[in-house]
Image: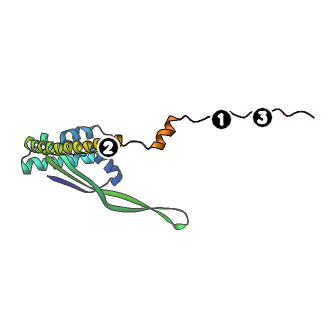
Amino acid sequence: MKAFLKNSRISPKKAALIADLVRNKKVTEALDLLKFTPKKGAKIMTKVIKSAAANAENNFKQDRKTLYISEIRVNKGLNYRRSVPISRGRIHPILKRNSNIWVVVSPEAKPSDDKKVKAESKKVDKKVEKNVKADTKKVEKKAEKKSKVEPKKADVKAKAEPKKETAAKTPESKPKK
């Protein structure tokens, strides 16, 4: 359930922007989005996605409403080399970049698959809860041990006696001569 477009006359950077818009979306949703996107790459991407969906319908008997874009890649294609003449017989090169576009569509996950995933995630959650409880018990025990330790005698004396504050010395006025 794939479709390729080789050497499309759009640079890979520009095509990649459009590909990011529709990646991991339903085919119908992606086509609606591209319909109102005012870029050259939107028309090109629409054709490739329609082709991949048509391949899925015709060859694999899939329903278009259940398909989503599982993979979409935009790679560099051939470069057309052109040049512009400048002064003193020299030229400036121009690269007209092309891109290869690859779209893979697949049916959405079945509800039975979702149940398996949810059951596995519940098992993992229970294990995590057990580990968290064990860790909190360890921390509580350490805190109890620290609170049971008595402070040293020197620390008790220092806390009991307040520090003596020395009065600030004021400079005495000097006698005039």
Q: Nearer the viewer, mark 1 or mark 3?
A: 1
The amino acid beneath tag 2 is Lys
Q: Is residue 30 left or right of residue 106?
A: right
**Is residue 60 found left or right of 137 in the rendered image?**
left
**Mark 2 lies on residue:** 145
Q: Which mark is residue 171?
A: 3
Q: Answer with mark 1 or mark 2, whichever residue precedes in sequence.
A: 2
Q: List the residue tagged with mark 1.
A: 166
Classify mark 1: helix, strand or loop: loop
Three-letter amino acid code of the residue under disc 3? Pro
Q: Mark 1 or mark 3: name the one nearer the start of the chain.
A: 1
Q: Position of residue 111 (x, y in %)?
A: 9, 40
CA gap, disc 1 and disc 3: 15 Å
Per the model, the C-alpha gap separating discs 3 and 2 is 54 Å
Badge 1: how crowded within 10 Å, few (<14), some, or many (20+)?
A: few
User: In the rendered image of this protein, does residue 166 appear above or below residue 62?
Assistant: above
**What x and y, as percent, mark residue 72?**
24, 51
